[in-house]
Image (cartoon, rainbow, N blue to C red):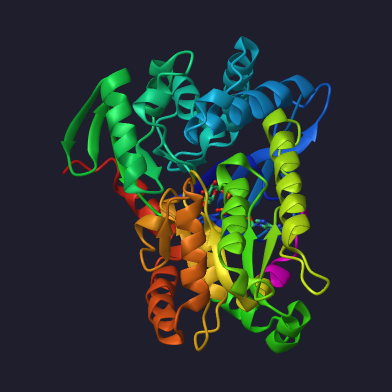
Amino acid sequence: MSPRLVVVSNRLPLGDNPSGGLVVALEDALRNSGGLWVGFSGETSPSPEDRLTFHDGARFQRASFDLTEEDYETYYVGCSNSVLWPLCHGRADLMRILPEYVEGYRRVNARLADLLLPHLQPGDRIWVQDYHLFPLAAELRARGVTAPIGHFLHIPFPGAQDCAALPNPAELFGWLSHYDLLGFQAHRDLNAFVQSAQELSRIEELGGDRFRLAGRGLRAAVFPIGIDASAFIQEARRAPNEDRMRSLTGAEMMIGVDRLDYSKGIPQRFRAFQILLENHPDLHEKIAFLQVAPPTREEVQAYRDILEETEHLAGRINGQFATINWTPIRFLHRSLPRATLAGLYRQAHIGLVTPLADGMNLVAKEYVAAQNVVDPGVLILSRFAGAAETMDQALLINPHDPWELAEAMETAMRMSANERRRRHAALLREVVEHDVTWWSASYLDALGRARDSD
Ligand code: ADQ
Protein backbone atom coordinates (compact mmCIF):
# COMPACT_ATOMS: atom_id res chain seq x y z
CA MET A 1 0.00 0.00 0.00
CA SER A 2 1.31 3.49 -0.84
CA PRO A 3 1.99 5.94 2.01
CA ARG A 4 -1.20 7.44 3.37
CA LEU A 5 -2.26 10.73 1.79
CA VAL A 6 -3.60 13.46 4.05
CA VAL A 7 -5.23 16.37 2.18
CA VAL A 8 -5.97 19.62 3.98
CA SER A 9 -8.06 22.34 2.36
CA ASN A 10 -10.06 25.33 3.55
CA ARG A 11 -13.41 23.65 2.84
CA LEU A 12 -14.07 19.95 3.27
CA PRO A 13 -16.13 18.55 0.38
CA LEU A 14 -19.21 17.29 2.23
CA GLY A 15 -22.41 15.60 1.07
CA ASP A 16 -22.89 11.87 0.48
CA ASN A 17 -21.56 11.97 -3.02
CA PRO A 18 -19.05 14.78 -3.21
CA SER A 19 -18.27 15.64 -6.81
CA GLY A 20 -16.05 18.26 -8.42
CA GLY A 21 -12.68 18.03 -10.14
CA LEU A 22 -10.45 18.12 -7.09
CA VAL A 23 -12.41 15.38 -5.32
CA VAL A 24 -12.38 13.18 -8.40
CA ALA A 25 -8.64 13.77 -8.83
CA LEU A 26 -7.75 12.93 -5.27
CA GLU A 27 -10.28 10.19 -4.68
CA ASP A 28 -8.13 7.35 -6.03
CA ALA A 29 -5.03 8.44 -4.18
CA LEU A 30 -7.06 8.87 -0.99
CA ARG A 31 -8.93 5.59 -1.32
CA ASN A 32 -5.91 3.51 -2.30
CA SER A 33 -3.85 4.80 0.59
CA GLY A 34 -6.63 4.76 3.23
CA GLY A 35 -6.36 8.53 3.12
CA LEU A 36 -7.84 11.39 5.10
CA TRP A 37 -9.21 14.78 3.95
CA VAL A 38 -9.51 17.53 6.54
CA GLY A 39 -11.22 20.92 6.15
CA PHE A 40 -13.60 23.54 7.53
CA SER A 41 -17.21 22.30 7.86
CA GLY A 42 -18.68 25.60 6.67
CA GLU A 43 -20.42 25.98 10.08
CA THR A 44 -19.66 28.51 12.78
CA SER A 45 -20.41 27.92 16.45
CA PRO A 46 -19.72 29.88 19.66
CA SER A 47 -17.49 27.15 21.10
CA PRO A 48 -16.30 24.65 18.47
CA GLU A 49 -15.09 21.28 19.71
CA ASP A 50 -11.36 20.93 20.09
CA ARG A 51 -11.25 17.77 18.03
CA LEU A 52 -12.06 16.85 14.44
CA THR A 53 -15.51 15.50 13.53
CA PHE A 54 -15.38 12.42 11.27
CA HIS A 55 -17.99 11.92 8.52
CA ASP A 56 -19.26 8.70 6.92
CA GLY A 57 -20.31 8.18 3.37
CA ALA A 58 -17.20 8.68 1.24
CA ARG A 59 -14.67 6.13 0.06
CA PHE A 60 -11.99 7.81 2.16
CA GLN A 61 -11.95 9.36 5.63
CA ARG A 62 -13.24 12.91 5.96
CA ALA A 63 -12.92 15.07 9.04
CA SER A 64 -14.06 18.63 9.62
CA PHE A 65 -13.80 21.41 12.17
CA ASP A 66 -16.09 24.38 12.91
CA LEU A 67 -14.92 27.97 13.33
CA THR A 68 -16.04 30.63 15.76
CA GLU A 69 -17.80 33.59 14.17
CA GLU A 70 -14.71 35.69 14.96
CA ASP A 71 -12.34 33.20 13.28
CA TYR A 72 -14.60 33.09 10.24
CA GLU A 73 -14.59 36.89 10.00
CA THR A 74 -10.84 37.32 10.51
CA TYR A 75 -9.24 34.21 8.97
CA TYR A 76 -11.68 33.63 6.08
CA VAL A 77 -13.55 36.82 5.14
CA GLY A 78 -10.68 39.00 6.38
CA CYS A 79 -7.18 37.70 5.77
CA SER A 80 -7.98 35.09 3.07
CA ASN A 81 -10.54 36.98 0.99
CA SER A 82 -9.85 40.64 1.75
CA VAL A 83 -6.04 40.53 1.91
CA LEU A 84 -4.51 37.50 0.19
CA TRP A 85 -7.05 37.09 -2.65
CA PRO A 86 -6.80 40.70 -3.93
CA LEU A 87 -3.02 40.67 -3.37
CA CYS A 88 -2.54 37.53 -5.49
CA HIS A 89 -4.81 38.93 -8.23
CA GLY A 90 -2.90 42.18 -8.68
CA ARG A 91 -5.44 44.24 -6.68
CA ALA A 92 -3.38 45.34 -3.68
CA ASP A 93 -5.53 48.50 -3.81
CA LEU A 94 -8.52 46.41 -2.67
CA MET A 95 -6.70 44.90 0.31
CA ARG A 96 -8.18 45.66 3.70
CA ILE A 97 -5.40 45.09 6.21
CA LEU A 98 -6.41 44.88 9.87
CA PRO A 99 -4.15 43.47 12.60
CA GLU A 100 -6.95 41.16 13.79
CA TYR A 101 -7.18 39.59 10.31
CA VAL A 102 -3.56 38.45 10.38
CA GLU A 103 -3.91 37.30 14.00
CA GLY A 104 -7.03 35.30 13.12
CA TYR A 105 -5.24 33.73 10.14
CA ARG A 106 -2.31 32.64 12.32
CA ARG A 107 -4.68 31.44 15.07
CA VAL A 108 -6.81 29.24 12.77
CA ASN A 109 -3.74 27.69 11.12
CA ALA A 110 -2.22 26.96 14.56
CA ARG A 111 -5.51 25.45 15.78
CA LEU A 112 -5.77 23.31 12.66
CA ALA A 113 -2.26 21.96 13.32
CA ASP A 114 -3.37 21.07 16.89
CA LEU A 115 -6.49 19.31 15.58
CA LEU A 116 -4.57 17.40 12.93
CA LEU A 117 -1.64 16.28 15.07
CA PRO A 118 -3.30 13.36 16.93
CA HIS A 119 -4.46 11.88 13.60
CA LEU A 120 -1.12 11.84 11.81
CA GLN A 121 0.69 8.52 11.40
CA PRO A 122 4.29 7.62 10.57
CA GLY A 123 4.76 7.48 6.79
CA ASP A 124 1.99 10.02 5.96
CA ARG A 125 2.33 12.50 3.08
CA ILE A 126 0.49 15.74 3.68
CA TRP A 127 -0.87 17.88 0.83
CA VAL A 128 -2.05 21.37 1.78
CA GLN A 129 -4.31 23.25 -0.66
CA ASP A 130 -4.24 26.96 -1.36
CA TYR A 131 -3.69 30.37 0.15
CA HIS A 132 -5.87 29.96 3.24
CA LEU A 133 -3.30 27.62 4.75
CA PHE A 134 0.18 29.00 3.94
CA PRO A 135 1.33 28.77 7.62
CA LEU A 136 0.17 25.19 8.20
CA ALA A 137 3.49 23.44 7.48
CA ALA A 138 5.37 25.80 9.84
CA GLU A 139 2.77 25.09 12.55
CA LEU A 140 3.06 21.32 12.02
CA ARG A 141 6.87 21.44 12.04
CA ALA A 142 6.75 23.42 15.32
CA ARG A 143 4.81 20.44 16.74
CA GLY A 144 7.48 17.96 15.62
CA VAL A 145 5.93 16.71 12.35
CA THR A 146 8.68 15.49 10.00
CA ALA A 147 6.45 13.98 7.25
CA PRO A 148 6.75 15.31 3.69
CA ILE A 149 4.40 18.29 3.35
CA GLY A 150 3.47 19.82 0.00
CA HIS A 151 1.51 22.94 -0.89
CA PHE A 152 -0.40 23.72 -4.08
CA LEU A 153 -1.41 27.29 -4.84
CA HIS A 154 -4.56 27.44 -6.99
CA ILE A 155 -4.31 31.21 -7.61
CA PRO A 156 -1.49 33.37 -9.02
CA PHE A 157 1.64 34.02 -6.96
CA PRO A 158 2.08 37.78 -6.45
CA GLY A 159 5.02 39.67 -7.92
CA ALA A 160 7.55 41.40 -5.67
CA GLN A 161 5.75 44.77 -5.88
CA ASP A 162 2.53 43.24 -4.63
CA CYS A 163 4.18 41.03 -1.98
CA ALA A 164 5.82 44.16 -0.61
CA ALA A 165 2.31 45.47 0.17
CA LEU A 166 1.85 42.78 2.86
CA PRO A 167 2.32 43.90 6.47
CA ASN A 168 5.23 41.45 6.90
CA PRO A 169 6.31 40.04 3.51
CA ALA A 170 9.23 38.00 4.88
CA GLU A 171 6.77 36.04 7.04
CA LEU A 172 5.09 34.62 3.92
CA PHE A 173 8.38 33.18 2.68
CA GLY A 174 9.18 31.88 6.17
CA TRP A 175 5.88 29.94 6.10
CA LEU A 176 6.56 28.58 2.61
CA SER A 177 10.07 27.45 3.53
CA HIS A 178 8.66 24.66 5.73
CA TYR A 179 7.14 22.79 2.78
CA ASP A 180 9.00 20.09 0.84
CA LEU A 181 7.25 20.90 -2.43
CA LEU A 182 5.56 24.09 -3.65
CA GLY A 183 3.27 23.59 -6.63
CA PHE A 184 2.17 26.41 -8.92
CA GLN A 185 -0.35 26.62 -11.76
CA ALA A 186 1.94 28.27 -14.34
CA HIS A 187 5.56 29.18 -15.03
CA ARG A 188 4.56 32.78 -14.55
CA ASP A 189 3.78 31.98 -10.88
CA LEU A 190 6.97 30.01 -10.27
CA ASN A 191 8.97 32.94 -11.69
CA ALA A 192 7.05 35.44 -9.55
CA PHE A 193 7.74 33.30 -6.49
CA VAL A 194 11.48 33.17 -7.16
CA GLN A 195 11.76 36.89 -7.94
CA SER A 196 9.66 37.92 -4.94
CA ALA A 197 11.71 35.67 -2.66
CA GLN A 198 14.92 37.19 -4.05
CA GLU A 199 13.74 40.68 -3.15
CA LEU A 200 11.94 40.04 0.10
CA SER A 201 13.60 36.95 1.60
CA ARG A 202 16.63 34.74 0.88
CA ILE A 203 16.52 32.19 -1.93
CA GLU A 204 19.22 30.21 -3.72
CA GLU A 205 18.55 28.29 -6.92
CA LEU A 206 20.21 24.89 -6.59
CA GLY A 207 19.39 23.64 -10.09
CA GLY A 208 16.29 22.04 -11.58
CA ASP A 209 13.38 22.35 -9.19
CA ARG A 210 15.60 22.61 -6.07
CA PHE A 211 15.86 25.77 -4.00
CA ARG A 212 17.04 26.89 -0.59
CA LEU A 213 14.49 29.33 0.85
CA ALA A 214 15.20 31.16 4.13
CA GLY A 215 17.85 28.51 4.89
CA ARG A 216 15.69 25.43 4.16
CA GLY A 217 15.83 23.14 1.13
CA LEU A 218 12.67 22.61 -0.91
CA ARG A 219 11.40 21.99 -4.41
CA ALA A 220 9.15 24.24 -6.45
CA ALA A 221 7.58 23.37 -9.79
CA VAL A 222 4.63 23.91 -12.13
CA PHE A 223 1.63 21.53 -12.17
CA PRO A 224 -1.17 23.03 -14.29
CA ILE A 225 -4.51 21.76 -12.96
CA GLY A 226 -6.98 20.15 -15.37
CA ILE A 227 -10.61 19.00 -15.37
CA ASP A 228 -12.20 15.56 -15.29
CA ALA A 229 -12.23 15.72 -19.09
CA SER A 230 -13.79 12.37 -19.99
CA ALA A 231 -16.69 12.90 -17.55
CA PHE A 232 -17.28 16.40 -18.89
CA ILE A 233 -17.26 15.24 -22.51
CA GLN A 234 -19.89 12.62 -21.62
CA GLU A 235 -21.95 15.16 -19.73
CA ALA A 236 -22.00 17.54 -22.71
CA ARG A 237 -22.92 14.76 -25.16
CA ARG A 238 -25.90 13.81 -23.03
CA ALA A 239 -27.11 17.44 -22.92
CA PRO A 240 -30.50 18.37 -24.45
CA ASN A 241 -30.91 18.60 -28.18
CA GLU A 242 -28.78 21.40 -29.56
CA ASP A 243 -30.94 22.45 -32.48
CA ARG A 244 -33.93 22.89 -30.27
CA MET A 245 -31.98 25.08 -27.86
CA ARG A 246 -30.43 27.14 -30.63
CA SER A 247 -33.79 27.88 -32.20
CA LEU A 248 -34.97 29.15 -28.82
CA THR A 249 -32.27 31.80 -28.74
CA GLY A 250 -32.52 32.68 -32.45
CA ALA A 251 -28.90 33.86 -32.59
CA GLU A 252 -25.43 32.43 -32.07
CA MET A 253 -24.69 32.29 -28.37
CA MET A 254 -21.59 33.68 -26.68
CA ILE A 255 -21.20 32.39 -23.11
CA GLY A 256 -19.32 33.51 -20.00
CA VAL A 257 -19.40 31.43 -16.79
CA ASP A 258 -17.62 32.79 -13.74
CA ARG A 259 -18.08 33.37 -10.05
CA LEU A 260 -19.01 37.04 -9.86
CA ASP A 261 -15.47 38.06 -8.87
CA TYR A 262 -13.65 41.28 -9.76
CA SER A 263 -10.69 39.21 -11.01
CA LYS A 264 -12.79 37.66 -13.79
CA GLY A 265 -13.04 40.80 -15.98
CA ILE A 266 -16.84 40.69 -16.40
CA PRO A 267 -17.49 44.48 -16.77
CA GLN A 268 -14.58 44.68 -19.24
CA ARG A 269 -16.15 42.01 -21.45
CA PHE A 270 -19.54 43.76 -21.30
CA ARG A 271 -17.87 46.96 -22.55
CA ALA A 272 -16.17 45.02 -25.35
CA PHE A 273 -19.56 43.57 -26.37
CA GLN A 274 -20.99 47.08 -26.45
CA ILE A 275 -18.17 48.18 -28.78
CA LEU A 276 -18.81 45.15 -31.00
CA LEU A 277 -22.49 46.08 -31.34
CA GLU A 278 -21.75 49.76 -31.91
CA ASN A 279 -19.27 48.97 -34.69
CA HIS A 280 -21.07 46.04 -36.34
CA PRO A 281 -24.80 46.65 -36.81
CA ASP A 282 -24.81 43.59 -39.11
CA LEU A 283 -24.25 41.44 -36.00
CA HIS A 284 -27.37 42.74 -34.26
CA GLU A 285 -29.81 39.87 -33.64
CA LYS A 286 -27.04 37.47 -34.79
CA ILE A 287 -25.23 37.17 -31.45
CA ALA A 288 -26.62 36.81 -27.92
CA PHE A 289 -24.38 36.95 -24.89
CA LEU A 290 -25.26 34.77 -21.88
CA GLN A 291 -23.31 35.58 -18.72
CA VAL A 292 -23.80 33.09 -15.87
CA ALA A 293 -22.26 34.37 -12.65
CA PRO A 294 -23.27 32.91 -9.28
CA PRO A 295 -22.96 35.07 -6.16
CA THR A 296 -19.77 34.68 -4.17
CA ARG A 297 -18.24 36.24 -1.01
CA GLU A 298 -21.05 38.73 -0.59
CA GLU A 299 -19.74 39.63 2.87
CA VAL A 300 -16.98 41.62 1.13
CA GLN A 301 -17.82 45.12 -0.17
CA ALA A 302 -15.80 44.76 -3.40
CA TYR A 303 -18.09 41.85 -4.40
CA ARG A 304 -21.25 43.87 -3.79
CA ASP A 305 -19.76 46.64 -5.93
CA ILE A 306 -19.02 44.32 -8.86
CA LEU A 307 -22.63 43.06 -8.84
CA GLU A 308 -23.96 46.57 -9.05
CA GLU A 309 -21.57 47.48 -11.88
CA THR A 310 -22.42 44.33 -13.85
CA GLU A 311 -26.20 44.78 -13.53
CA HIS A 312 -25.89 48.42 -14.49
CA LEU A 313 -23.84 47.67 -17.62
CA ALA A 314 -26.14 44.84 -18.74
CA GLY A 315 -29.16 47.12 -18.34
CA ARG A 316 -27.52 49.93 -20.26
CA ILE A 317 -26.39 47.75 -23.17
CA ASN A 318 -29.79 46.06 -23.43
CA GLY A 319 -31.50 49.45 -23.31
CA GLN A 320 -29.25 50.70 -26.12
CA PHE A 321 -29.56 47.74 -28.50
CA ALA A 322 -32.42 45.36 -27.66
CA THR A 323 -35.21 44.82 -30.19
CA ILE A 324 -38.60 43.19 -29.81
CA ASN A 325 -37.03 39.86 -30.85
CA TRP A 326 -33.60 40.10 -29.28
CA THR A 327 -32.04 40.70 -25.87
CA PRO A 328 -28.29 41.19 -26.43
CA ILE A 329 -27.19 40.26 -22.87
CA ARG A 330 -28.79 37.83 -20.47
CA PHE A 331 -27.20 37.95 -17.04
CA LEU A 332 -27.99 34.99 -14.73
CA HIS A 333 -26.85 35.74 -11.21
CA ARG A 334 -27.07 32.15 -9.97
CA SER A 335 -25.45 28.73 -9.99
CA LEU A 336 -26.54 26.09 -12.52
CA PRO A 337 -26.33 22.27 -12.41
CA ARG A 338 -23.19 20.94 -14.13
CA ALA A 339 -25.24 19.11 -16.76
CA THR A 340 -27.03 22.33 -17.72
CA LEU A 341 -23.72 24.20 -17.92
CA ALA A 342 -22.22 21.47 -20.10
CA GLY A 343 -25.18 21.74 -22.51
CA LEU A 344 -24.92 25.54 -22.64
CA TYR A 345 -21.20 25.40 -23.38
CA ARG A 346 -21.84 22.93 -26.17
CA GLN A 347 -24.32 25.11 -27.97
CA ALA A 348 -22.32 28.33 -27.49
CA HIS A 349 -20.49 29.50 -30.61
CA ILE A 350 -18.07 31.52 -28.47
CA GLY A 351 -16.68 30.76 -25.01
CA LEU A 352 -15.56 33.95 -23.33
CA VAL A 353 -12.91 33.54 -20.62
CA THR A 354 -11.39 36.95 -19.97
CA PRO A 355 -10.06 37.23 -16.41
CA LEU A 356 -7.72 40.09 -15.49
CA ALA A 357 -5.84 37.54 -13.36
CA ASP A 358 -6.53 33.84 -12.79
CA GLY A 359 -4.55 30.89 -11.44
CA MET A 360 -5.69 28.52 -14.21
CA ASN A 361 -9.41 28.93 -15.12
CA LEU A 362 -11.23 25.66 -15.48
CA VAL A 363 -14.12 27.15 -17.46
CA ALA A 364 -11.76 27.46 -20.47
CA LYS A 365 -11.10 23.70 -20.27
CA GLU A 366 -14.75 22.79 -19.67
CA TYR A 367 -15.82 24.85 -22.69
CA VAL A 368 -13.35 23.02 -24.94
CA ALA A 369 -14.31 19.59 -23.57
CA ALA A 370 -18.02 20.29 -24.16
CA GLN A 371 -17.76 21.18 -27.87
CA ASN A 372 -19.11 19.12 -30.72
CA VAL A 373 -15.90 18.18 -32.58
CA VAL A 374 -17.54 18.49 -36.01
CA ASP A 375 -18.83 22.02 -35.45
CA PRO A 376 -16.89 23.38 -32.47
CA GLY A 377 -17.12 26.87 -31.03
CA VAL A 378 -14.26 29.33 -30.52
CA LEU A 379 -12.55 29.96 -27.19
CA ILE A 380 -11.54 33.56 -26.48
CA LEU A 381 -9.01 33.44 -23.65
CA SER A 382 -7.24 36.09 -21.59
CA ARG A 383 -3.44 36.11 -21.67
CA PHE A 384 -3.63 36.56 -17.89
CA ALA A 385 -5.28 33.20 -17.18
CA GLY A 386 -2.80 30.45 -16.25
CA ALA A 387 -4.60 28.41 -18.93
CA ALA A 388 -3.12 30.66 -21.63
CA GLU A 389 0.31 29.03 -21.13
CA THR A 390 -0.92 25.73 -22.53
CA MET A 391 -4.00 26.76 -24.56
CA ASP A 392 -2.39 28.96 -27.18
CA GLN A 393 -4.74 27.76 -29.93
CA ALA A 394 -7.49 29.86 -28.36
CA LEU A 395 -7.90 33.48 -29.51
CA LEU A 396 -5.61 35.00 -26.88
CA ILE A 397 -6.51 38.57 -25.90
CA ASN A 398 -5.65 41.35 -23.48
CA PRO A 399 -8.83 41.70 -21.38
CA HIS A 400 -8.02 45.29 -20.44
CA ASP A 401 -8.36 46.41 -24.07
CA PRO A 402 -12.06 46.30 -25.04
CA TRP A 403 -11.30 47.10 -28.69
CA GLU A 404 -8.98 44.10 -29.01
CA LEU A 405 -11.58 41.93 -27.29
CA ALA A 406 -14.40 43.23 -29.52
CA GLU A 407 -12.27 42.40 -32.56
CA ALA A 408 -11.70 38.85 -31.27
CA MET A 409 -15.48 38.46 -30.87
CA GLU A 410 -15.96 39.48 -34.48
CA THR A 411 -13.17 37.15 -35.65
CA ALA A 412 -14.81 34.29 -33.74
CA MET A 413 -18.23 35.03 -35.28
CA ARG A 414 -16.78 34.87 -38.79
CA MET A 415 -14.21 32.07 -38.32
CA SER A 416 -14.44 29.24 -40.89
CA ALA A 417 -15.44 25.77 -39.75
CA ASN A 418 -12.02 24.46 -40.83
CA GLU A 419 -10.13 26.88 -38.66
CA ARG A 420 -12.48 26.26 -35.73
CA ARG A 421 -11.91 22.50 -36.02
CA ARG A 422 -8.12 22.88 -36.30
CA ARG A 423 -7.88 25.09 -33.22
CA HIS A 424 -10.34 22.99 -31.25
CA ALA A 425 -8.55 19.71 -32.00
CA ALA A 426 -5.29 21.07 -30.55
CA LEU A 427 -7.05 22.48 -27.49
CA LEU A 428 -9.00 19.29 -26.87
CA ARG A 429 -5.82 17.20 -27.03
CA GLU A 430 -4.29 19.40 -24.34
CA VAL A 431 -7.40 19.25 -22.10
CA VAL A 432 -7.66 15.46 -22.38
CA GLU A 433 -3.93 14.70 -21.95
CA HIS A 434 -3.49 17.01 -19.00
CA ASP A 435 -6.64 16.26 -17.06
CA VAL A 436 -7.11 16.47 -13.31
CA THR A 437 -5.95 12.90 -12.71
CA TRP A 438 -2.68 13.64 -14.53
CA TRP A 439 -2.33 16.75 -12.37
CA SER A 440 -2.72 15.00 -9.00
CA ALA A 441 -0.58 12.02 -10.06
CA SER A 442 2.29 14.23 -11.21
CA TYR A 443 2.12 16.36 -8.08
CA LEU A 444 2.05 13.35 -5.75
CA ASP A 445 4.87 11.70 -7.66
CA ALA A 446 7.00 14.84 -7.18
CA LEU A 447 6.05 15.03 -3.50
CA GLY A 448 7.12 11.40 -3.11
CA ARG A 449 10.53 12.27 -4.57
CA ALA A 450 10.93 15.67 -2.89
CA ARG A 451 13.29 14.36 -0.21
CA ASP A 452 15.54 12.46 -2.70
CA SER A 453 18.94 14.05 -3.10
CA ASP A 454 19.94 14.34 -6.72
P1 ADQ B 1 -12.20 29.66 -9.36
O1 ADQ B 1 -11.76 31.07 -9.20
O2 ADQ B 1 -13.47 29.31 -8.71
O3 ADQ B 1 -11.08 28.60 -8.93
P2 ADQ B 1 -12.42 28.38 -12.11
O4 ADQ B 1 -11.15 27.67 -12.35
O5 ADQ B 1 -12.97 29.06 -13.31
O6 ADQ B 1 -12.33 29.50 -10.99
O7 ADQ B 1 -13.47 27.32 -11.59
C1 ADQ B 1 -14.81 27.66 -11.42
C2 ADQ B 1 -15.68 26.40 -11.39
O8 ADQ B 1 -16.98 26.79 -10.95
C3 ADQ B 1 -15.82 25.77 -12.76
O9 ADQ B 1 -15.79 24.38 -12.64
C4 ADQ B 1 -17.21 26.24 -13.22
O10 ADQ B 1 -17.89 25.33 -14.05
C5 ADQ B 1 -17.94 26.40 -11.91
N1 ADQ B 1 -18.96 27.47 -12.05
C6 ADQ B 1 -18.75 28.75 -12.36
N2 ADQ B 1 -19.92 29.41 -12.48
C7 ADQ B 1 -20.89 28.52 -12.24
C8 ADQ B 1 -22.33 28.56 -12.22
N3 ADQ B 1 -23.02 29.67 -12.45
N4 ADQ B 1 -22.99 27.44 -11.93
C9 ADQ B 1 -22.32 26.30 -11.67
N5 ADQ B 1 -20.99 26.19 -11.68
C10 ADQ B 1 -20.27 27.27 -11.96
C11 ADQ B 1 -9.75 28.68 -8.38
C12 ADQ B 1 -8.78 29.57 -9.15
C13 ADQ B 1 -8.70 29.15 -10.60
C14 ADQ B 1 -8.31 27.67 -10.70
C15 ADQ B 1 -9.18 26.82 -9.81
C16 ADQ B 1 -8.68 25.38 -9.72
O11 ADQ B 1 -9.18 30.94 -9.04
O12 ADQ B 1 -7.76 29.95 -11.32
O13 ADQ B 1 -8.45 27.24 -12.04
O14 ADQ B 1 -9.22 27.33 -8.48
O15 ADQ B 1 -7.34 25.33 -9.35
| Residue 332 falls in image quadrant | bottom right
Q: Is residue 318 magenta?
A: no
Toward the viewer: 84 or 309? 309
Q: Is residue 252 left or right of residue 187?
A: right
Q: Is residue 200 left or right of residue 276?
A: left
| Residue 109 falls in image quadrant | top right
Q: Is residue 335 visible?
A: no
Vertical position of residue 140 compared to residue 230: above or below: above
Vertical position of residue 430 compared to residue 46: above or below: below
Q: Residue furthest top?
A: 99
| Residue 263 falls in image quadrant | top right
Toward the viewer: 74 or 150? 74
Which residue is pictured at 42% across the width and 43% down the height?
A: 123
Which residue is pictured at 52% across the width and 39% down the height?
A: 130
Position of residue 253 measured from the top left corner of the image (x, y, whole percent):
65, 72
Toward the viewer: 351 or 148? 351
Q: How many marks?
A: 0
Q: Which residues are magenta?
A: 332-341
Vertical position of residue 320 compared to residue 421: above or below: above
Position of residue 105 measured from the top left corner of the image (x, y, whole percent):
60, 22
Q: Is residue 224 left or right of residue 233?
A: left
Position of residue 342 measured from the top left corner of the image (x, y, whole percent):
65, 72
Pick the quarter of the image with the C terminus. Answer: top left
Q: Is residue 328 visible?
A: yes
Q: Is residue 174 left or right of residue 259?
A: left
Which residue is pictured at 78% across the width and 23% down the height?
A: 69
Pick the quarter of the image with the N terminus. Answer: bottom left
Position of residue 298 measured from the top left corner of the image (x, y, whole percent):
75, 36
